[in-house]
Amino acid sequence: FLFAKNRAVYLFDCWPEHRESIRRYLSEAGVQNVMINSHRFVSEIESMGLNLRAHYVPEAVDIEEYLALPFERKDIDVIEFGRKHPEYHRRICESLKSNDRRHQHGILDTREAFVEALSRSRVSICFPRTMTTPGLDPKFEFCSMRYLQSIASKCLVVGKAPADLIKLFGYNPVIEADLENPEEQIESILGNFDSYGEFIERNRKTLYDNHTWKHRAADILAILAEDL
């Protein structure tokens, strides 16, 4: 990297509190092209006054690495993985337990166990970090992997869609969580899950057609080719 004529990096999760360290790294490393998984942070990079080009390259998944069980074989009602919305989690935990629903929210020790649990889940709860970690700037919402992993596994995603995700798909692929009445909403969704089948299939097809690492690799190669 240090001896390359054209230097490029792909940065993930560039939070505003790391702005100065990111600026220093890009400057000292002599980077010509920086790719970032946040559309909002591209303008932050551009405002640093560095001699480089910043590009928005969103995250993706290799859809073949995830299982997509038929809806009738899904036996986990709700899955939560990664960061949780504390109050929302507390309230749906109580409701799901009282309604004898199966709720997966513990740690899964292996990737195989994670992929299997996700494939068996009907609903996947996903919130951006700006809603799960107090004090973060709400303007910096990332479209994290958990959204794409859930869609690849044919889960119905419930929570909050980052703006980048809506732009990527051209519509909102997330059922927006009712934070005032989460118990009633989740039970209603599970009770009428069959009605979401077409929506879930549409989400997965959009992902397959546009947002795999094959697509991102083509985007990255096109960016790098501009400097050849």
Image (cartoon, rainbow, N blue to C red):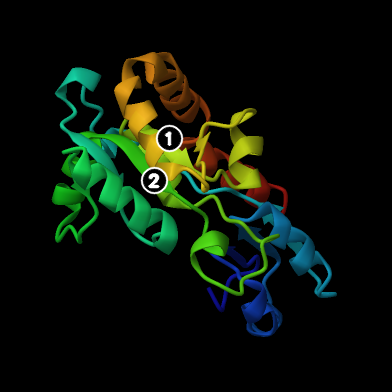
| Residue 38 in view, yes or no | yes
- Towards the viewer: 39 or 129: 129
- Towards the viewer: 203 or 156: 156
Mark 1 sits on what residue? 185
Quadrant in the rendering for residue 47: bottom right
Distance from disc 1 to disc 2, alpha carbons, whole Å, reads 12 Å
Q: Position of residue 87 (x, y in %)?
A: 43, 60
Q: Earlier in the sequence, mark 1 or mark 2?
A: 2
Q: Vertically, is 29 above or below 79?
A: below
- Towards the viewer: 214 or 140: 140
Identify residue type, mark 2. Answer: Ile
- Point 65% across, 65% down: residue: 6
| Residue 22 in view, yes or no | no
- Point 33% across, 48% down: residue: 92
- Label 2: state its secondary structure: strand
Q: Position of residue 220 (x, y in %)?
A: 58, 47
- Label 1: state its secondary structure: helix
Q: Position of residue 41 (x, y in %)?
A: 70, 62
Identify residue type, mark 1. Answer: Gln
Q: Which mark is residue 125?
A: 2
Q: Vertically, is 143 above or below 23?
A: above
Q: Which mark is residue 108?
A: none
Label 1 crowd (10 A; few <14 / some 14-19 / many >=20): some
Label 2 crowd (10 A; few <14 / some 14-19 / many >=20): many
